[in-house]
Image (cartoon, rainbow, N blue to C red):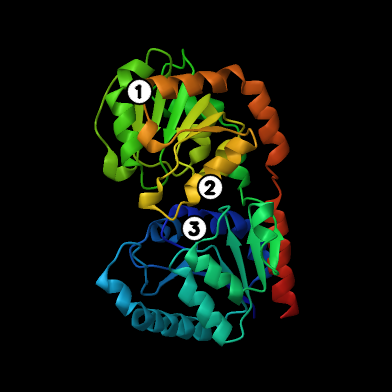
């Protein structure tokens, strides 16, 4: 009996690729379970699709915090819990998408000599995945340059589901309360929203409505209740293909999964990366890379202004064909096939 254990959490970007991989591997395993956190967004996304099991999570606080001193003890507890789950389920293989919940699962798998295949979406590798990479048989990446830095690195590309790539223009027009008489600007800040981007767009919404209609995915905790003709506010959207299908331009954070989805849909995008003070700088590196490759444009959060954003959106519109051509040539659409082949091969040969 072969059992695949999937893990990853902290953001939806750590679990959506696992769900996207599911159709490609489900017929090759007798059982597939998901190990996540008690309260993370991955729980709501996964429950109802896969058996979901929780373990205690250990998150490193980047600023000075006494809680960091207890990490070794809490991590040992998490690893012990993960080890018990892997033994109970007789796990054949672990597929990890990263995040702080995945690390103890991968450490436990290594202790039990269970192979791990992991995937990193960002250009730069986070702490959890740097440690996980050492436990992995194969370390898969969305960026070629990232794979080249690891002996076990394999470039497969971004794991994009066929659903996210589906053109659903008619359904999107029925879904959102817009007139579609002007270009639609999609504003998205990631699964939990982006306060600075939300506040900026709402403050100057009347200015932007002169040129665009706005579909604003703001995060469930950031609903404002603003009601204006041509402005549609949505807290959370399970099916982002609907939003992508009606978008002419986008203003977005630069988390790798959302960024690659926008690029794969050939939507000219102005990225506003999460600043270094609020992150490890991964979004800044992603945005710089995409800009240098002439796939998108970017602006720093602290430089947001109506004049600057309007100028950059106008540049994206004028050069739409050039950006679209670069995007089509850059983004591979077969990452899930490549990933599934590796996962299935490792499980068979174990």
- In this orientation, which residue lies closer to the viewer: 237 or 196? 196
Q: In this view, does 59 lie to the left or right of 334?
A: left
Where is mark 2, residue-wise? 285
x 37%, y 67%: residue:
60
Q: How crowded is mark 1: few (under 14 residues within 10 Å), some or many (20 or more)?
A: many
- Is residue 54 something that shows in the picture? yes
Q: Which of marks 2 and 1 is in front?
A: 2
- Corner quadrant of residue 167: top right
x 33%, y 63%: residue:
39
Q: Residues within 10 Å of mark 2 (few under 14, many from 20)?
A: some
Q: Nearer the viewer, mark 2 or mark 3?
A: 2
Q: Distance between the residues labelled 3 and 1?
A: 30 Å
**SS under mark 3:** helix
x 70%, y 34%: residue:
328
Query: Residue 8 in the image: x percent, y percent?
Result: 49, 64
Quadrant containing the N terminus in the rendered view: bottom right
- In this orientation, which residue lies closer to the viewer: 233 or 209? 209
**SS under mark 2:** helix
Where is mark 3, residue-wise? 14
Q: Distance between the residues labelled 2 and 3?
A: 18 Å
Tell me if residue 265 comes above or below residue 118 in the rendering: above
Disc nearer the start of the sequence (2/3):
3
Tell me if residue 97 comes above or below residue 283 in the rendering: below
Disc nearer the start of the sequence (3/1):
3
Q: How many numbered dots are placed on residues in this image?
A: 3
Query: Residue 215 in the image: x percent, y percent?
Result: 41, 28
Quadrant containing the C terminus in the rendered view: bottom right
Q: Is residue 120 left or right of residue 12?
A: right
Query: Residue 208 in the image: x percent, y percent?
Result: 38, 19
Where is mark 1, residue-wise? 231
């Amino acid at each position: 009996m072969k059992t695949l254990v999937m893990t990853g959490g902290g953001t939806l970007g750590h679990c959506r690729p696992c769900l996207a991989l599911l159709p490609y591997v489900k017929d090759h395993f007798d059982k597939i379970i998901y190990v996540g956190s008690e309260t993370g967004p991955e729980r709501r996304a996964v429950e109802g699709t896969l058996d979901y099991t929780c373990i205690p999570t250990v998150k490193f606080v980047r600023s000075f915090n006494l809680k960091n001193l207890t990490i070794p003890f809490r991590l040992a507890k998490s690893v012990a819990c993960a080890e018990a789950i892997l033994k109970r389920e007789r796990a054949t293989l672990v597929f990890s998408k990263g995040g702080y919940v995945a690390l103890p699962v991968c450490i436990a798998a290594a202790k039990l000599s269970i192979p791990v295949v992991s995937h990193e979406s960002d250009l730069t590798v986070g702490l959890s995945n740097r440690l996980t990479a050492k436990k992995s048989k194969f370390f898969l990446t969305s960026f070629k340059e990232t794979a080249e830095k690891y002996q076990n690195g394999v470039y497969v590309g971004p794991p994009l589901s066929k659903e996210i790539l589906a053109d659903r223009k008619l359904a999107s027009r029925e879904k959102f309360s817009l007139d579609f008489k002007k270009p639609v600007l999609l504003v998205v800040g990631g699964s939990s929203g982006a306060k600075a981007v939300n506040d900026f767009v709402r403050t100057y919404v009347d200015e932007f409505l002169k040129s665009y209609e706005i579909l604003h995915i703001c995060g469930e905790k950031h609903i404002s209740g603003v009601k204006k003709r041509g402005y549609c506010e949505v807290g959370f959207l399970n099916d982002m293909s609907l939003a992508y299908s009606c978008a002419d331009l986008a203003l977005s954070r630069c988390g790798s999964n959302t960024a690659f989805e926008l690029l794969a849909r050939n939507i000219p995008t102005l990225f506003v990366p999460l600043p270094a003070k609020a992150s490890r700088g991964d979004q800044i590196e992603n945005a710089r890379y995409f800009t240098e490759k002439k796939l998108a444009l970017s602006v720093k959060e602290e430089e947001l202004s109506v004049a600057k954003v309007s100028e950059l959106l106008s540049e994206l519109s004028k050069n739409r064909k050039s950006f679209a051509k670069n995007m089509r040539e850059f983004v591979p659409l077969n990452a899930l096939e490549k990933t599934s082949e590796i996962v299935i091969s490792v499980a068979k040969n174990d």
